[in-house]
Amino acid sequence: MQKTSLRKGENASLLTTQTVLPVVVQGISADVSALLLGPDGKVRSDHDLVFYNHPAQDGVSVEGAAVTAELSRLPAGVHRVVVVVSADPLQPGAVFTRAPQLSISQNGVSAVVFTAPDFTSGETVVVLAELYRRGDGWKVRAVGQGYASGLAGLATDYGVDVDPEPPTMPLPVQASTIPGQAIAVDLTKLERQAPGLLAPARQASQALAARGITGRKAAVYLLLDHDWEMEELYESFAVQAFAERVLALSANLDDDGTVPVIFSSGREPFLEEIRLDNYRGRIGQLHTQVDWGWGNVADAMRRAVSHYQESGAVDPAFIVTQVGDEPWDKAEVRSMLQNTASLGIFWLFVGFGRGKLAFYKNLNASASATFTNVAFYDASKTPGSVPDERFYTGLVDGFATWMQS
């Protein structure tokens, strides 16, 4: 098997055989464990946490700093195996700075290597990779997701029961910079339900504060391009990671912990939602229910507007619309933008993918065709490589200007 070096979000195929995943950690003492997950992204029981005190379960075992998965032995109810590295609790204050390195061997041959980006937010637990079913085979995806909230945060996300911990001090809140207001952003709900999103949520909070709109509310929507040319970005976890960042932003703007998601494809738009309590792997679960096609952006926009109006929301709508190429219904898109300018709806078109995006970039290029409720942000072909600070600045810049006007 040819040796492959993966970057965060990328994947590779595996043979259906014994797979050994040794981990190398520099700088701190750490423990390696694994989680066996069902189709809902949760453990089936607490026995699905495999670690030094419970070193084997259903074909997955942990010995020292390595996880071994007998893929052919895994029960049909196990859809994913997650490899986790955690700082040794006997080392108080130990956090990851240099990311652990994971290598994957099959039939005694090292086939895949992954080193996550370094960590800077006090992470004590890292999800390094996941093995997941694809058809009749298995693949590995490089994840590199850090948790500053420790094993309790990881357990919450994956449905593992943990012993109650002593109460902790509430998360610091950031005072609003809006003159005359002292509204605070409370991320306690996110800390409890999705601690893995705490770091990006704080970055989003800082971006909102820098633009003077901390404490302002909005109903956040997410529209995703399901054009067939986007297939690789769905497969590589890039769209999932993008959706998680939008969900983290919504935690600062909307306290219901839910973002409606609309997939734009060649047929009727598909509406679902991503929540703080189900976001892990959610986009991968949903998009397989949608046909590939030429993205019908205008229809997806209409579906979002209808949902917003029917919801009876009093806060404005912030509709984040991911686009991978030019729309084929340009006149309809322009008409939608004009017709919603007075409805309290702001449209942010976020471009990433391989297609041309001149239409969206030039929406406000002409003084005669200025849309006051529209902005465009080019997130590059690989949005996951954009640091959180810069990403959220691009996401909220136009929205903040619109809110303040």
Image (cartoon, rainbow, N blue to C red):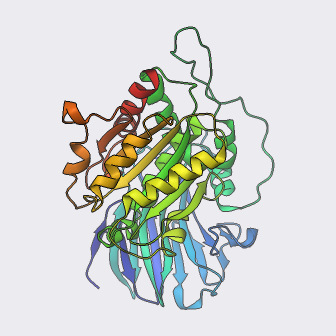
Left or right, residue 389 beside residue 63 = left
Is 113 in front, or is 285?
285
Quadrant in which the C terminus appears? top left
Quadrant in which the N terminus appears? bottom left
Q: Is residue 366 above or below residue 148?
A: above
Is 302 in front, or is 21?
302
Image x and y of residue 52, in percent: 65, 66
Q: Is residue 159 above or below residue 289?
A: above
Q: Is residue 1 above or below residue 97?
A: below
Residue 144, by quadrant, is: bottom left
Q: Is residue 193 above or below residue 403?
A: below
Is 352 in front, or is 77?
352
Q: Is residue 87 among the parts visible in the rendering?
A: no
Image x and y of residue 134, in percent: 47, 82
Q: Is residue 60 among the parts visible in the rendering?
A: yes
Q: Residue at x 70, y 71 (%)?
A: 54
Left or right, residue 359 beside residue 46 = left
Image x and y of residue 64, in percent: 55, 68
Left or right, residue 17 beside residue 308 = left
Q: How many marks?
A: 0
Q: Residue at x 59, y 58 (%)?
A: 273
Left or right, residue 227 beside residue 174 = left
Q: Residue at x 39, y 57 (%)?
A: 298
Is 222 in front, or is 145?
222
Q: Residue at x 28, y 73 (%)?
A: 4
Residue lying furthest top in this view? 180
Image x and y of residue 248, in percent: 53, 43
